[in-house]
Amino acid sequence: MALVEVKNISFRYPNGYLAVDDVSFSIEAGENIAIVGQNGAGKTTTVKMLNGLTKPCEGDVLIRGESTKKYTTAQMARKVGYVFQNPEDQIFNATVYKEIEYGLKKMKLPAEECERRIQDAAELAGIGEYLDMNPYDLPLSIRKFVTIASVIASDCDVMIFDEPTAGQDLDGLQRLSALNRILTGRGKAIVTITHDMEFVAENYDRVIVMCQKKVIADGRTRDVFFEKEIMNKAMLKQPALVRIADQIGMDHNTLDIAEVAVYIKTGQG
């Protein structure tokens, strides 16, 4: 049984607007998946149905075999954590420490366990030096890591990151890459919504492409990104390495820059 099973879900807003149309996929523990597509493709509405922020109008979402429809949003937050694109939609405590601690107190964990989780999450997110500061005294890039730390501390099975690379410098991008490796190594499933195709190419083995409310591709990133028809239909730009590999006529798909460099030098893969 997969950790997450999305079965033919659709969602229509009260005004009749169809936001997601018959979407299905599954996610295993330890998987690191990117969901990509233009604005309006249905990405955010889809992932909100994973943690109960939105309930499917049709179909079902199962987390460890149990339907999200059986639980409240608060209950689902312990299973599936969501890091919003805008930290201001999530942060409301006076210090970074209290922001990370808030959810743990709601879970009524022992003080020692709360402290352990806070310190672990802060270290992973690289924000240990900011624990006593007001989050709104920090730049946007750091505030994003505050919200990520809050979700890490909850120790949920699935973690959803909505546009985590927006506003990040090279250090922030490298920290996100390291976080993905560490968390999936702990058996967490990471689902990332992003428009950053370069970051996806470098960090994700699997990508789901959405277009016009549907999934139009789901497979290995190195294969999907070489499908010009799929990328064009979704109005997504192929990563630079893919375009270079295509131009030099490589005989196999790769997202490994070293392989491309060797091919350029020798003409061989």
Image: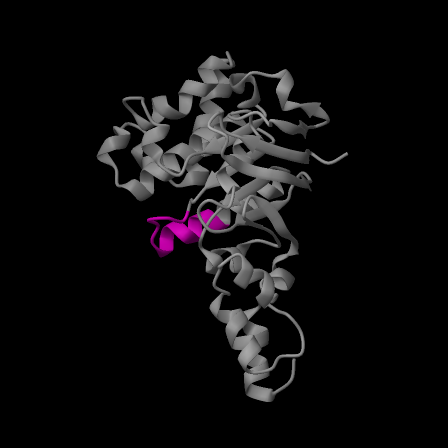
* Residue 113, horizontal then vertical, whole percent: 51, 20
* Residue 197, horizontal then vertical, whole percent: 48, 58
Quarter location, residue 2 = top right
Q: Which region shows up in magenta? A: 165-177
Please state which of residues 266 and 255 is positioned toward the viewer in this rendering.
255
Q: How is the image coloured?
A: one colour
- Magenta highlight on residue 50: no
Does 171 sit above or below residue 261?
above
* Overall secondary structure of the magenta section: helix
256 with respect to 27 (left or right): left
Please state which of residues 67 and 200 is positioned toward the viewer in this rendering.
67
Does 91 sit above or below residue 221?
above
Please state which of residues 145 and 45 is positioned toward the viewer in this rendering.
45
Q: Residue at x 37, y 53 (%)?
A: 171
Q: What residue occupies the far left of the structure in this picture?
A: 137
Figure disc tally: 0
Does 222 sit above or below residue 109?
below
- Magenta highlight on residue 176: yes
* Residue 249, horizontal then vertical, whole percent: 60, 82
